[in-house]
Amino acid sequence: MSKPLTHQPLAAIGALMRATGDQAMRLIYPPVCAGCARMVAEPQALCAACWSSVRFIERPYCEVLGMPFDHDRGEGMVSPEAISDPPPYAKARAVVFYDGVARKLAQALKYSDRADLAKMMGLWMVRAGREVIEASDVVLCVPLHRTRLLTRRYNQSAELARAVAAISGKPFEPGALRRIKPTRQQVGLGLRARQDNVRGAFMTPPAQVMRIAGRKVLLVDDVLTTGATLGSATRALIRAGAEQVNVLTFARVASLDTETLYA
């Protein structure tokens, strides 16, 4: 009489079947560069040419705004902009500048149903944002209003926040911040118009205050342009009792030119 299969052989057989299935899928749908669609060795990766064109944000930069300096001004230096007009959040960090391939990735995630890019982008964000991630207790995203969520079908910021939380091991609380005002799209608006557009747009529902009060929050978004949206969301979290809010985005603009505001 033959012995029944144990859990260990069954697990090995399952792993072999999954590996075989993955190999078959790669033959049918070979992985391509997320930036230019050339074939690459691994899925959710960039080819050498696209990778070399990405402008990563590195030190030295303003300790508050995360915007790079043109030269090293010493450890812990803060920019004049952060001193004259300090943001409500403690620190902002971003992975890349919003141009070229990085801009293409951000727009594909947001407008072209490429939610699959969130994992790769989230990995980059965790590496670049380790400082603010470690200083935070919980991860939140900038929410969409329910009417826009219905038309777009998913929130790109939530996909990034979910990936960051999963990779870093931090809890993700998607319901702890709500957009209560159906704001206009920020594209094409100047700084003052953006600030007016999102003023009072966010709140923490009373039933969710316990998830925020006394905690250090990491607020995740896809792109930091003027900081108006993130500032408004941060103020709502502080009103709900958040001890501190840090910001982490995939990209940020280098300058507020006309092309950027209409991107």
Image (cartoon, rainbow, N blue to C red):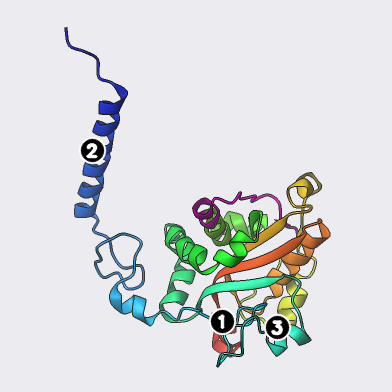
Give the residue type at disc 1: Val
| Disc 1: which residue | 253
| Disc 3: which residue | 191
Residue 87, image x, y percentages: 74, 76
Majority secondary structure of magenta residues: loop
The image quarter containing residue 100 is bottom left
| Relative side of 10 to 138, left or right | left
66 relative to 236, above or below:
below
Using a 10 Å C-alpha cutoff, classify the residue at mark 2 as few (fewer than 14 neighbours), some (14 to 19) or many (20 or more).
Answer: few
Q: Gap between marks 2 and 3, in whole Å?
A: 55 Å
Residue 245, image x, y percentages: 71, 64
Residue 129, image x, y percentages: 55, 67
Instruction: Judge depth for marks 3 and 1 and give the one in front.
Output: 1
Q: Nearer the viewer, residue 185 or 158?
A: 158
Q: Are marks 2 and 3 in contact (CB under 8 Å)?
A: no
Q: Gap between marks 3 and 1, in whole Å?
A: 13 Å
